[in-house]
Amino acid sequence: KNDVLMEVYVKWEVTKENPGKFITKLKVVKDATLADLRKLIEIHLGIDKQDFTFLLLGDPTGAPITKENEATVLASKLPTCSSQLGGHLACLRPVKGAQTPALLPFSPLENKLPATPVSSCLKKVDDYLSPNLRL
């Protein structure tokens, strides 16, 4: 059964903003395509799903593989890991502008809210809690 499966180590591309974090290790059949890998990776990423493209490390062009071509590229064509015998490395490039709002810092809207002195907030609260309130 081991000759049918291969291990694929999945990590993000190293950039200025990203240290190339390891994502997961997957066991896939040897004839799995990058499209198959994408499905497994998207399940693994779950709610933090970040859109990505595959990079063929070692390819002279260094061009990312388009989603349309993922079904034609076998995962076994990915480069082998230098530190792991028999394992392949899938390097993912995050797609710019596809970040989920949870990953973004506070929105500029919060900077536009009028500054309200604490004393006026407390006064409003005191008004609502005062015994003079008519029901």
Image (cartoon, grey):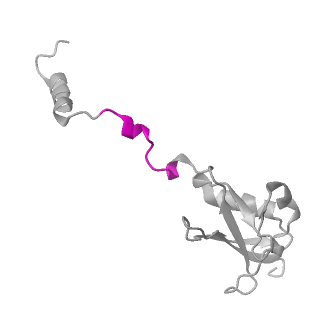
Q: Quadrant of the N terminus?
A: bottom right
Instruction: Identify the residue shown where x is 74% and y is 64%.
Output: 54
User: Residue 64's quadrant in the figure?
Assistant: bottom right
User: Residue 6's quadrant in the figure?
Assistant: bottom right
Q: Residue furthest front?
A: 61
Q: Residue 57: image x %, image y %?
A: 75, 74
Instruction: Identify the residue shown where x is 31% and y is 32%.
Output: 114
**Foreground of the two, 107 or 32:** 107
Q: Quadrant of the C terminus?
A: top left
Q: Which residues are magenta?
A: 102-114
User: Residue 3's quadrant in the figure?
Assistant: bottom right
Q: Is residue 50 left or right of residue 127?
A: right
Q: Residue 76: image x %, image y %?
A: 82, 75
Asked whether 127 falls inside the magenta stretch, the response is: no
Instruction: Identify the residue shown where x is 71% and y is 82%.
Output: 81
Q: Residue 38: image x %, image y %?
A: 74, 60
Asked whether 113 falls inside the magenta stretch, the response is: yes
In this rendering, the answer to whether 51 lies above or below 130 is below
Q: Is residue 22 left or right of residue 125?
A: right
In this rendering, the answer to whether 100 lies above or below 133 is below
